[in-house]
Amino acid sequence: MLPSLTPVQTMMVILGSSAVLITALEGVLIARARGPEAYDWKAFWTTIRINLCRAIVESIPMGVVIGVALPFGAWAYEHRLFTVPMDTWWGWVAMFLCTEFFYYWLHRTGHRVRWYWASHSIHHSGNQYNLAAAFRQSVTGKISGGFVFFAPQCFFGFSPDAVLISYGVNLAYQFWIHTDLIDKMGWMEGWLNTPSAHRVHHAANVEYLDANYGGTIMIFDRLFGTYVPEKEGVPIRYGLVKQVTTHSALKILFSEWIGIFKDVFRARRLRDALGYMFMPPGWAPDGRGLTTEDLRREMKALTGSPTGVPPEELLDRRPMTRGAAAADDADLAFKSAR
């Protein structure tokens, strides 16, 4: 007898199945329109394998995978400051804005704190920007602790189930914007998260790194100075700064965690160990790392402008930064770089 699913689990099954079918259809259409080489089917099947791993992990009881999101959310809801009435229009507006605000900071932290980047980097590991990238997600989100950004919503009066559903809707919206088939969308740019705005977010060009974190709207990016519009005539190279060349789902999922552990193990001081865990990706104790700021400075020195995609020689000459512990594996040719 099959176990019964919760409403949230049912929603995720429906969304996941639909995403696979639509993504496969997109691949067929792109291959027919642009030629067989235009769509990376190996990467598509890697994404499928990644999601099978994710399904296995999600089937394990919450406590086993250190998934304390719902228990903590339930505790916060029991001690809530007030109750937001979800039978009113303003309750749903408040839920939307609250979810978007906390998602912005979760997403920004996922790029600026290596501990969170170890999970989020999987989403950026694809070298093509298409719908398959939308559902290439980590299996270690519960371990990295992203739930801490959404539990406060329960404290502010939203039930855990309502928070999860709101977060699911936020992610569902983002599915369609993972495409290079749709051009800029006029007045919507700068206000909504559009395909153009999200192309910037997935770019490896240094001028585009750490930008456009919003899930559905760009309001908080504009408020906090992280909104960057797509520039006309500037080719975008997608994926991590140091591109992934493996199709091994397990290596993609766990190499950055291995890199963190290796860096922490070889650290000479506690401060360095903590830096390898919680400073931005690419941080190095001597200040000669490959963080976003370092890459822009290096590109300005090389080309006169803090723009463009860093050349391989720049990335390779500093082998122990930006996740390069993973470079010890000859089959895995990427470091922790956006």
Image: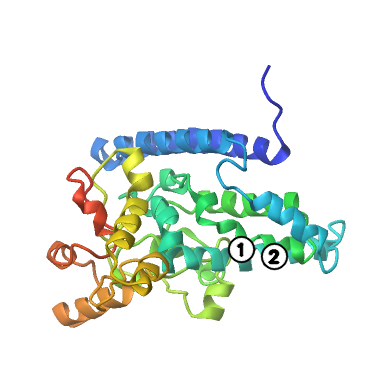
State left or right for residue 121 relative to residue 76. left
Give the CA distance from mark 1 to mark 2.
7 Å
Colour scheme: rainbow
Q: Residue pushed farthest top?
A: 1
Q: How many marks?
A: 2
Q: Residue at x 40, y 47 (%)?
A: 130
Residue 32 point in image, percent of width and height: 32, 35
Instruction: State whether residue 337 appears in this view.
Output: no
Asked if marks 1 and 2 touch (Cβ < 8 Å), the reply is yes
Indicate left or right for 149 with 224 as reference. right
Nearest to the observer: residue 191 or residue 128 = 128
| Three-letter code, disc 1 | Phe
In this rendering, would 123 be left or right of 245? Answer: right
Q: Amino acid at mark 2?
A: Pro
Q: Nearer the viewer, residue 333 or 255?
A: 255
User: SS class of the residue under badge 1?
Assistant: helix
Residue 270 % position (x, y): 37, 71
For residue 149, which numbered disc appears in the image?
1
Left or right of 271 on screen, residue 223? right
Residue placed under numbered mark 2 in the picture: 152
Secondary structure category for the residue under label 2: helix
Residue 266 screen position, x and y as percent: 27, 62
Which residue appears at 71% of the width and 55% of the height? 73
Of 307 and 25, the residue lying toward us:
307
